[in-house]
Amino acid sequence: MAVPPADFQLHNSLFLVAHFHNVIIGGVVFGVMAGYTYWFPKAFGFTLDERWGKASFWCWLIGFYLAFMPLYVLGLMGMTRRMQHYDVLSWQPWLLLAAVGTPSSWQASSARSCSSWSRFATASSSAM
């Protein structure tokens, strides 16, 4: 927020929250997942289930953008962080859209766990 007029408008708004999460999740979490998918087979000698990996990726991508892109709009509409209640009705559809993205991210985490678990289970049963 290097431009003072923009900083005055966007500081302490949901735009700032959306931007922070967009940078952190997009840069760190997606990078960790890519590294895990790439290095896991090299480290342990067996591959992860590709179907669960693709499901995890798409759920994360869709859930991530559904959860945080509406916050950019809400921030530009003037919604601040840490409000006790929201009485502006024009914010409601954007808040509901952001709420839809959260379960998709949970599903992505479950798919990633299933991918790892299914490979550990098949590797341990084939070793016996």
Image (cartoon, rainbow, N blue to C red):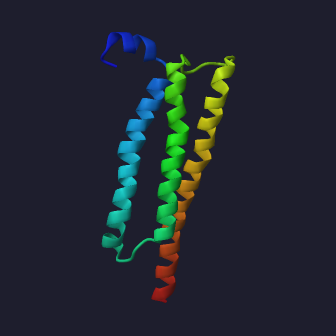
Of residues 75 and 49, the one nearer the viewer is: 75
* Left or right, 13 with reference to 90: left
In x, y percent, where is residue 45?
A: 34, 77
Can residue 118 be seen in the rendering of this structure?
A: yes
Q: Residue at x 40, y 74 (%)?
A: 47
Q: Residue at x 46, y 80 (%)?
A: 123
Q: Splitting the image into 4 quarters, where does residue 82 fall?
A: top right
How many circles with numbers are drawn on the protein? 0
Of residues 70 and 41, the one nearer the viewer is: 70
From this view, report whether residue 116 is shown above or below residue 3. below
The N terminus - image quarter: top left
In x, y percent, where is residue 102?
A: 59, 43
Q: Residue at x 36, y 67 (%)?
A: 40
In x, y percent, where is residue 68?
A: 51, 36
From this view, report whether residue 41 is shown above or below residue 105. below
* Left or right, 19 with reference to 122: left
From this view, report whether residue 77 is shown above or below residue 20. above
Q: Residue at x 52, y 73 (%)?
A: 118
* Left or right, 107 with reference to 4: right
* Left or right, 92 with reference to 107: right
Can residue 112 be seen in the rendering of this structure?
A: no
In x, y percent, where is residue 33?
A: 40, 56
Of residues 70 and 53, the one nearer the viewer is: 70
